[in-house]
């Protein structure tokens, strides 16, 4: 019986670690690339857990000598933990901790797009944890809004649309009293409309459809109110 791609990947990683010809930085880079390979098209949760293991080995090698690589391994490990199906809140909390540890380093050393990706993923984790009363939905919204600095509509229309969509959904899930229900609906409409100013049907049909489909589920009376206020 032949080994799976993931098993071969892990074996290759072990051989790379044992190699005396590779520098520490090269070993870290190889481990990160191998972990990313496990993440791309996982066939089973085992693939994602192997990715976590590979990222952790890279993290251990980084120590304090390679801060940016260390941050990338933390963010990658968090992303793999977040993706494990039926992982429960424990894995989500671990992912949250990983993103929060990586983010300050990313802000200092990484590209704006790398930072935005971490902020976007942190927002997703916080939004999931908020459903279990383990995070605040307002913190999720803040993370998404900060990610918009790096994911502009001109360069990253897909991410821009997804972020505004997630912000709107987060607003709709805020635990407000019935008297303030109009407020969360209004904020959600504003987020959808902000995205739709730039995301057009012809250029970005999938993103446009996503935003429009979610927008139409908001009662028309709330849409009328927000347009009147504007």
Image (cartoon, rainbow, N blue to C red):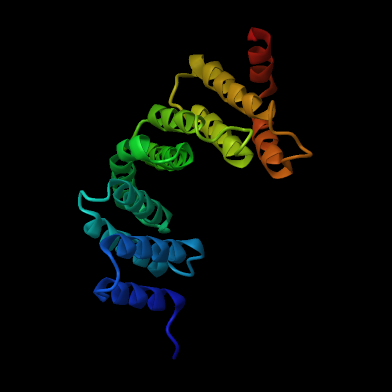
- Residue 28 is left or right of residue 155, and the answer is left
In the displayed structure, does residue 104 sit left or right of residue 209? Answer: left
Say which quarter of the image contains residue 12. Answer: bottom left
58 in relation to 90, above or below: below
Q: Residue furthest right?
A: 202
Is 26 situated above or below 143? below
Position of residue 170 measured from the top left corner of the image (x, y, whole percent)? 49, 32
Residue at position x 38%, y 77% in the image: 7
Q: Nearer the viewer, residue 77 or 29?
A: 29
52 in relation to 88, above or below? below
Residue 118 visible in this rendered orientation of the protein = yes
Whole-percent x, y for residue 87 in the image: 36, 56
Q: Is residue 198 above or below residue 88?
A: above
Counting labels gives 0
Residue 111 or residue 213, whichever sits in front? 111
Q: Residue at x 64, y 29 (%)?
A: 195
Q: Residue furthest bottom?
A: 1
- Quarter of the figure with residue 154: top right
* Residue 126: percent from left, percent from top: 38, 38
What is the quadrant of the N terminus in the image? Answer: bottom left
**x, y percentage for residue 204?**
72, 41
């Amino acid at each position: 019986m032949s080994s799976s791609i993931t098993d071969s990947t892990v074996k290759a990683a072990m051989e790379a670690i044992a190699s005396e010809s590779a520098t520490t930085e090269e070993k870290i880079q190889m481990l990160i690339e191998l972990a990313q390979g496990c993440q791309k098209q996982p066939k089973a949760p085992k693939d994602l857990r192997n990715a976590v293991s590979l990222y952790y080995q890279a993290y251990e090698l980084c120590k304090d000598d390679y801060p940016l690589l260390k941050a990338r391994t933390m963010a990658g490990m968090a992303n793999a933990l977040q993706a494990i199906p039926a992982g429960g809140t424990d894995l989500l909390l671990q992912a949250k901790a990983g993103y929060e540890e990586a983010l300050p380093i990313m802000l200092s050393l990484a590209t704006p797009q790398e930072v935005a990706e971490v902020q976007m993923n942190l927002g997703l984790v916080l939004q999931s944890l908020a459903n279990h009363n383990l995070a605040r939905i307002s913190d999720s919204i803040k993370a998404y809004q900060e990610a918009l600095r790096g994911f502009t509509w001109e360069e990253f229309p897909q991410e821009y649309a997804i972020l505004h969509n997630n912000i709107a959904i987060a607003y709709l899930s805020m635990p407000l009293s019935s008297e303030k229900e109009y407020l969360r609906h209004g904020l959600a409409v504003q987020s959808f409309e902000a995205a739709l100013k730039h995301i057009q049907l012809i250029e970005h049909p999938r993103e446009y459809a996503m935003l429009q489909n979610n927008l139409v589920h908001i009662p028309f009376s709330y849409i009328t109110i927000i347009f009147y206020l504007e």
